[in-house]
Amino acid sequence: MKKKALRLIDANFNRLKEGLRVCEDILRFVYDDHALTRSFKELRHQASQILLRFPIPYGTLIKLRDSKQDVGKKGVISDKRKPKWSDLFISNAKRAEESLRVLEETSKVVAPDNAREFQALRFKLYELEKRALKKC
């Protein structure tokens, strides 16, 4: 069971950082907002620091990764409309928030000391999202 929990953590670390990076790049290249870009970059780096301090080594998470057998990898993209930049920003901010919530809850079982760090990042992201949506 611990292996499955670690796979869950690995997937959500990846999802978190990917979502934050998309938000960061939209703010940087589309909206030219230096302050928000920096804030999203800092949040992404804070998440990386948690990963580096995580009690399970990153190499262990990678070894447990099983992308070939992932039952959810063939998800269908049903929305065929062309999204606006704000749509992409919102969907990736939500993706990152959801990942932080999963990391927070899963950490309670695997690495309880990290749960509060994920919670703090999640609330920080809520505030950043609010500021960014005024721009989008």
Image (cartoon, rainbow, N blue to C red):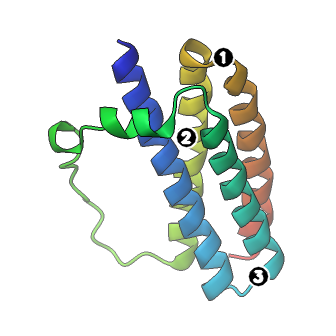
Mark-to-mark CA distance, 3 and 1: 36 Å
Residue lying at 47% horizontally and 49% vertically, measured from the top left: 15
The amino acid at mark 2 is Glu
Q: Is residue 126 above or below residue 88?
A: above
Along the horizontal axis of the image, is 22 left or right of 78? Answer: right
Q: In this view of the protein, which residue sits in the foreground, 114 or 85?
A: 114
The mark closer to the camera, 1 or 2, is 1
Q: Position of residue 120 (x, y in %)?
A: 78, 37
Mark-to-mark CA distance, 1 and 2: 18 Å
Residue lying at 76% horizontally and 82% vertically, measured from the top left: 33
Q: Secondary structure at mark 3?
A: loop
Q: Secondary structure at mark 1?
A: helix
The amino acid at mark 3 is Asp
**Image-quadrant location for residue 112:** top right
The amino acid at mark 1 is Pro
Q: Residues within 10 Å of mark 3 (few under 14, many from 20)?
A: some
Residue lying at 60% horizontally and 33% vertically, measured from the top left: 101
On the rendered image, what quadrant is the C terminus found in?
Answer: bottom right
Of label 2 and label 3, which has the lower sequence position? 3
**Image-quadrant location for residue 86:** bottom right
Of label 1 and label 2, which has the lower sequence position? 2
Q: Which mark is residue 33?
A: 3
Q: Which mark is residue 98?
A: 2
